[in-house]
Each structure stands twice: as structure tokens, then as C-alpha cells.
């Protein structure tokens, strides 16, 4: 049996009462049935990254700050990513964009898919994130999940996806596994 791919599930909101947390936990739970994926939840609230303050652009790679080095190691440890993303004013939350901006090479040549929620299932936010991902030399997957009516699907802090959410997430996992394996071999 081949080794599972290491996938980081990154929560894109740090807001009090955020939907990102129950949605992210649901994604992790669903991934447990997929032996080819080894998912880890990454909470940007725990990381508390400052707005990019360093003199050198991350693409130059000369990281000196201990937190930047730790974030680089975390991102480097993965074969792919699932972003749990809401839509703030038709774009991704600044905290998520900043987490992308914080390092560079560690994202390169790896697949990323998106699980969005909110009006339009965060379609506009995800569309913008695909442009950002492309600049980071990632494979931004066509497969993404757009959860409608998220507020009605969370009870006592637990999100339950409907059949459509499950189908889309399953497709996202399939694609992430395919691209993850292909790009891991190529890297
Ligand atoms: C600053 C801000 C801007 C928002 N802008 C949008 C928006 O453009 N489109 C939308 O569908 N929902 C918007 N919303 C509502 C969010 O979809 C909703 O609050 C969602 O739960 C946010 O995700 P979170 O709870 O994980 O932070 C906005 C919410 C906030 C806090």
C-alpha cells in the first residue's frame, strides 16, 4: 500500500463564532474514510501570523523570522491543501491571503482545493484564491465545494453536510488524491 498523502486543512477565518471551524471539522471527519489522505487541521487563530512585515519578499526564500520558518516548515510538510474559506466582501478573508503570502516555495507544485460557504458558496472568494494559488505555482483544482445555507446546517457547533455537499467533497478528495500523487512523484 502506498503511503497516504499529507493534507493540511486550513481554517480561513479567525472570527469569534466562525463557521469555518465546524465546516473544517466536518471535512476532517469525512477524510477519515479516505485511506489515501492523511488530513491535519491548521487553525490560523493558533498561528497568529502578523501582516507580512519582513524586508524580503518570500519568493527570495531567505526566511529569518522564527515564526516564518515554522510556517514554512508546516507548509512544506504537506503534499496538498484544503482551504476552508468564507467570502468577505466578495474576496477571501485577509488572514487567509496573508497566510498564503507568508512563504513561497513551500506551496509550489502542490494541489489545492477549496471548501467555501456563505452566499453563493463563496464562489467569488474561491475564484480569487485560484488566481493567488496560480501565482504560488500551485495546481488550483477545478474541484471545489460550495456549501449553500451553512447556517442551517450547523447545530450545537456541529456541521452536517447534505448529499450535494458530500458528493462535491468526495469529488474534491478524488481530485486532490490524483493530483497529489502525480505531483509528489514529479517533485
Ligand atoms: C467582514 C465580512 C464580510 C462579509 N462579506 C460577505 C460577502 O461578500 N458575501 C457573502 O456571501 N457573505 C459575506 N459575509 C457573511 C459570511 O458569509 C458569513 O458571516 C460567514 O459565516 C463567514 O464565515 P466565518 O463564520 O467562518 O467567518 C461577510 C461576513 C463578514 C464578517
Image (tube, rainbow, N blue to C red):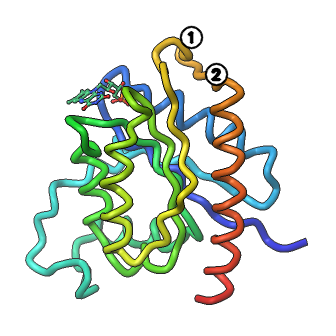
Q: Residue at x 39, y 41 (%)?
A: 123
Q: Residue at x 30, y 57 (%)?
A: 99
53 horizontally vs 164: left or right: left
Above/below status of 121 relative to 55: above
For the residue pair 3 and 119, the one nearer the viewer reads as: 119
- As measured in the structure, the alpha-carbon distance from the residue carrying label 1 to the one carrying label 2 is 8 Å
Element marked by disc 1: strand
**Residue 160, numbered label:** 2
**Percent x, y of residue 158:** 59, 19
Above/below status of 116 relative to 183: above
**Percent x, y of residue 142:** 53, 58
**Residue 171, numbered label:** none
Q: Residue at x 47, y 31 (%)?
A: 21
**How many dots with numbers?**
2
Element marked by disc 2: loop
State yes or no: discs 1 and 2 in contact (Cβ < 8 Å).
Answer: yes
Residue 178, image quadrant: bottom right
**Percent x, y of residue 185:** 68, 86
Say which residue label 1 marks.
155
**Circle 1: is it few (<14), some (14-19), or many (20+) Cα within 10 Å?**
few
21 horizontally vs 29: left or right: left
- Earlier residue among tags 1 and 2: 1
Above/below status of 126 relative to 55: above
**Percent x, y of residue 80:** 56, 65
Amino acid at each position: 500500500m502506498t503511503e497516504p498523502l499529507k493534507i493540511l486543512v486550513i481554517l480561513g477565518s479567525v472570527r469569534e463564532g466562525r463557521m469555518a471551524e465546524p465546516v473544517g471539522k466536518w471535512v476532517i471527519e469525512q477524510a477519515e474514510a479516505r485511506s489515501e489522505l492523511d488530513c491535519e487541521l491548521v487553525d490560523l487563530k493558533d498561528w497568529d501570523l502578523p501582516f507580512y512585515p519582513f524586508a524580503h519578499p518570500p519568493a527570495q526564500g531567505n526566511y529569518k523570522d522564527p515564526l516564518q520558518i515554522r510556517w514554512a516548515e508546516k507548509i512544506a510538510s504537506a503534499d496538498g491543501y484544503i482551504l476552508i474559506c468564507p467570502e468577505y466582501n466578495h474576496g477571501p478573508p485577509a488572514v487567509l491571503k496573508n497566510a498564503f503570502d507568508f512563504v513561497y516555495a513551500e506551496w509550489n507544485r502542490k494541489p489545492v482545493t477549496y471548501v467555501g460557504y456563505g452566499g453563493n458558496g463563496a464562489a467569488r472568494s474561491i475564484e480569487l484564491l485560484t488566481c493567488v494559488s496560480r501565482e504560488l505555482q500551485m495546481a488550483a483544482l477545478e474541484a471545489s465545494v460550495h456549501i449553500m445555507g451553512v447556517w442551517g446546517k450547523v447545530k450545537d457547533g456541529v456541521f452536517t453536510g447534505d448529499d450535494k455537499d458530500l458528493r462535491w467533497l468526495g469529488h474534491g478528495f478524488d481530485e486532490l488524491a490524483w493530483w497529489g500523487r502525480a505531483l509528489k512523484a514529479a517533485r
